[in-house]
Image (cartoon, grey):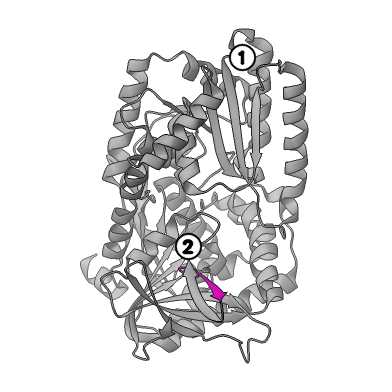
Amino acid sequence: MSPAKTSKASLIMVYHREPWEEHTVHGKAQWRDHRSPNGIIPTLRNVFRHNDQGLWVAWKKCKDPAQPDFQQDVTVDHNGVHVDVHRVPLTTEQVNLFYYRFSKEALWPVIFAFPGKLEVDESHWRNYVDVNRRFAEAVAARAAPDARIWVHDYNLWLVPGMLRQLLPHATIGFFHHTPFPAADVFAILPWRDQILASLLDCDLVGFHIPRYQENFVDAACNLAGARRIKTADVDDRFLTTGGALTTSRVTSVIEHPAHGQCQLGSFPVGVDVGAIDRIVASFGHRRRADAIRAEIGHRRVILSIERLDYIKGPVQKLLAYEQLLEHAPEYREKVVFVNILTPPADQIAAYRSVRKEVDLIVGRINGRFATLSWTPVRYFYKPLPYEDVLAWYDASSIAWITPLRDGLNLVAKEFVATARDRAMTLILSEFAGAQVELKHVIAANPYAPASMDAALRKALEMPDDEQRERMAAMDKIVRGHDVAAWADEFLTAMTPRHELRRSA
């Protein structure tokens, strides 16, 4: 680690987390990958692999932001990637209120269409505004006048508008890693006007799929007075029929009297297929996967891997599995449901009741149906190393991914990339953005027990040839739109608004 360059940056990545975690070992700083898996961070790091004028802006905790006890500007060279990093100093209390309280208790429930869980505290909103302002000021102080600035996710919704005031000639892009809710749901937020005004100051706002893109357009037009400038049929890549997230038309440019034109686009995040292939081809991976198979025996593994969160629908999934065992006794002792839940941050109180309910249902299912030689649910409540996650994919027959709402869901794509030429099946919620891309999944409505039951039975009875055909078709999609292609596509689409206006 060394002091960062003092020259102005031409490309700035604005994300709440640093590119690596900093650890002090024997008085010296060392950088490591984050303990909690995050597929986006390695991708964003690689943007800087061939750009020596780039900067990454994130927070770092300290006792006193006025006199931080760490170096704010550093250069990190790690595993062949060189990144200049600016750390915005925040106290533990500021982070807790900004991220774990306001973002997760006020914004998160509305973004994922659970407004009944919304908690409004104006003091938390003021802290959110203050943190966003600190990020914007840090970026503006280090950006070239015509810099390209890529801001990420709802935690930093207000940064674009603040930056537009400070850097009127910068090119500002924003990407939503979550869904964007329907306009009438988004309208519930007391701060909707400020959020929309900020996003309308972007040159490009990106989403995973056209449905979220149109939800934003509806909100911008109906709530903020924007108007559609350019619309078109949805690209074949996203064209589906009959699904919950289906749309046939999409708006690519909107205009607002006070903010000008804003370009919109759909850029579903991909996975690092190359990294997955390297791990899957290794001797260690084969040993781990074979050990799982030996432990499970002849039974087929139905796998669920997700973070503990009410939006992931863990309770609904367990109830559907219990119903299958109750009404279809022929599957007993022939399948094992492996339920791997990654614990959320301790600060998020909303998830504690979900864990209690999951624990109770797992205990009930195993108590009702277990035999001396068979445990119906194998339940893990802990984070697993990525290599172990890929081994579980490899050893499983069915991936069961049925969130009640999800921006995309990278687990589904990772499972597909791991399958190769084997007979495996993916059940995916029709409320997960990835279902729009992965058209060969078995789609399920997690709110409808009959739909969940039918999807499970279809997956268990599907002929091997059909399983291979479906997985091969999805593998082609996943490999053709990997995570590197996602970053390139977004950055290429970041057209400055004055150029957009000339081409309109």
Q: Main secondary structure of the magenta part?
A: strand
Residue 165 shows up from this direction = no
Residue position for label 2: 33
Horizontal arrangement in the rendering, residue 254 relative to residue 456 (left or right): left
- What amino acid is at disc 1? Glu
Residue 456 within the magenta-colored segment of the rendering: no
| Foreground residue among 471 and 227 | 471
- What amino acid is at disc 2? Asp
Q: Give percent across and percent down for residue 36.
A: 55, 56
**Disc 1/disc 2 C-alpha distance (Å):** 40 Å
Q: State whether residue 68 is above or below residue 42.
A: below
- The secondary element bearing badge 2 is classed as loop
Q: The magenta stretch spans which residues?
A: 19-25
Q: State whether residue 368 is above or below residue 51.
A: above
Residue 477 is drawn in which quadrant?
top left
Quadrant of the snapshot with the C terminus: bottom left
Residue 333, labelled with which disc? 1
Q: Give percent across and percent down for residue 181.
A: 55, 50
Q: Residue at x 44, y 50 (%)?
A: 214
Q: Residue at x 31, y 35 (%)?
A: 475
Quadrant of the snapshot with the N terminus: bottom left
Residue sitting farthest toward the left: 503
